[in-house]
Image (tube, helix red, strand yellow):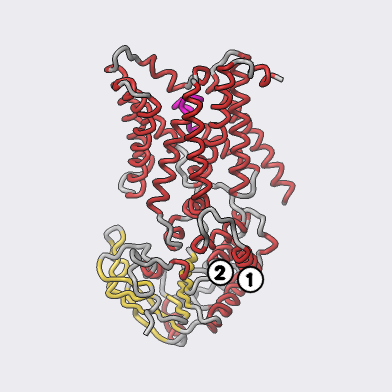
Amino acid sequence: MAVIELLQYDFMRRALIAALLVGLVAPTVGTFIVQRKLALLGDGIGHVALTGVALGFLTGTAPVLTAVVVAILGAVAIEIVRSRGRTSGDVALALLFYGGIAGGVLLIGLAPGGSNATLLGYLFGSVSSVSVQDVVVVAVLTAVVLGVVAAFGRELFVLCQDEEVARTYGLPVRFLSLLIAVTAAVTVVIAMRVVGLLLVSALMVVPVAAGQQVARSFRGTMLVAMGVGVFAAVGGLTTAFQADVAPGAAIVLIALGLFAIALVAGRFLRRRSL
Amino acid sequence: MSDPVFRLSEGKVTLGGRPVLRGVDLVVGPGEVVAVLGPNGSGKSTLVRTLLGLVPLASGSVEIYGRTPQRFRDWRRIGYVPQRLTAGGGVPATVREVVASGRIARQRRFLPASAADRAAVRDALAEVELADRAGDPVQHLSGGQQQRVLIARALAGQPDTYVMDEPTAGVDAASQQALAASMRRVAGEGKTVVLVAHELGPLAPVITRVVVLTDGEIVKDGPPSIADTSQEHCHPHESVWP
């Protein structure tokens, strides 16, 4: 089997582990984000994270670290703007999109030896260059995100259903909203190396969109989305290796293909149940 | 002397620069079944949402069981039924998932649903006659059935006080009867109910007090008999009965 064949290469083993974890974790967080109508949140955070990456090169710090910090700050900013409701959510996101990209490009130019080419690996992903240390970071962050979902899943479900109702259950609505935003930020950085910042959000949203078509429950949607995410990540990576195409793009296109299949299957299932 | 369930004093609410409540005083005692009536835009929804601390007061004060909403901690005593189920981003959720979430204020982190949780959810589903639809996505249900899901979610939490925002609006006759039966039972158990309605309909026998709101002010407050005249006044031709 093709996947087994790939396992003989060290770099592919690391890449597969990273892809597997990202495929698992991105749709998990994505299910809550989609239900909150924040499907583009991942994109906003991804753009902001680019500034974080450039800041890492400029200061000689690990880019993943600075990306996490800046992404979290950006996510908190988005959440504050959203909850205040002064500016409409999409305008607030748009401002962060542009600020994030412009900041990243400006800062990378100031970094010693840095150029826009340096950013390409982060914008489009470079899963084949994942180091052992990267895999460890991805694994730890994945455990953190899944731990948050396990611990707060019930509260987050209520919050995503209806914020006012959540308040009347005495839930800490502001804390939980920030928790979702920060968890999304961490997820974006986890996925950054695998699919790239420009495509991160796809892995958070497309598998969930596929799950929505065929599942009947929230939990079911999340499980289908996780399955789609893992299949797309591993399948995309394998395809990319064999056909020599960009892994991030292959992963996202496979996820979109699975969405199309789910769309048709969902129609069929609903027709039969009527 | 125990605290009243809700105490709103001189409550003024402004939404988007428009005054919606103009200095409302309302005290709801334990065991009362209060219907808030009034024409569209009179501030009925805003009033009950203000009681829960969901709408900020421009001036005045509100207390839930003797504490401000910010200081109030015993939220398991409150069961809020919003006007409608929000669709959100369209991720499906089953009837059981939504009803079970009503137990949230009684559950501990990391612990799975207890036998008491499961029993409460089962009873709530049976009470609103949706036990056979438990596994269906709420999105597939009719408006009246969705309303029953929201009521079941509140019932599952076994609160002392129910606050319902138009539970009978746009609801079929069967669902209205089911709601009336549930209200009779909870009222019989001495629970407090504050509900917003257009008219009393099948709920009439359960109601102990009627508050009529017009243009952000309470114009009538008394026994259900006062509703008849005000209903004529507010809705001469309207009826939700088919």
Front one among A205 and A180: A180
Residue A200 colored in magenta in the image:
yes
Residue B232 is at least partly visible in this image? no
Residue holding disc 2:
B155
Residue range (magenta):
A192-201
Query: Label 1: which residue?
Result: B127
Q: Residue at x 58, y 61 (%)?
A: B99
Q: Nearer the viewer, residue B69 or A14?
A: A14
Task: Please say if A96 is above or below B47.
Answer: above
User: Which chain is disc 1 placed on?
Assistant: B
B198 versus B221 height, above or below: above
The N terminus of chain A, quarter of image: top right
Q: Which badge, 2 or 1, is on the more N-terminal residue?
A: 1
Residue flagged by tag 2: what amino acid is it?
A: Leu
Q: Quadrant of residue A68?
A: top left
Q: Are marks 2 and 1 in contact (CB under 8 Å)?
A: yes
* In-front residue for pair B184/A157: A157
> For numbered disc 2, what is the local secondary structure?
helix
Asked whether residue B10 appears in the rendered view, the answer is: yes
Q: Secondary structure at mark 1?
A: helix
Residue at image point 34% right, 27% down = A51
Residue B8: x %, y % from top left = 33, 74
- Tell whether A206 sits left or right of B57: right
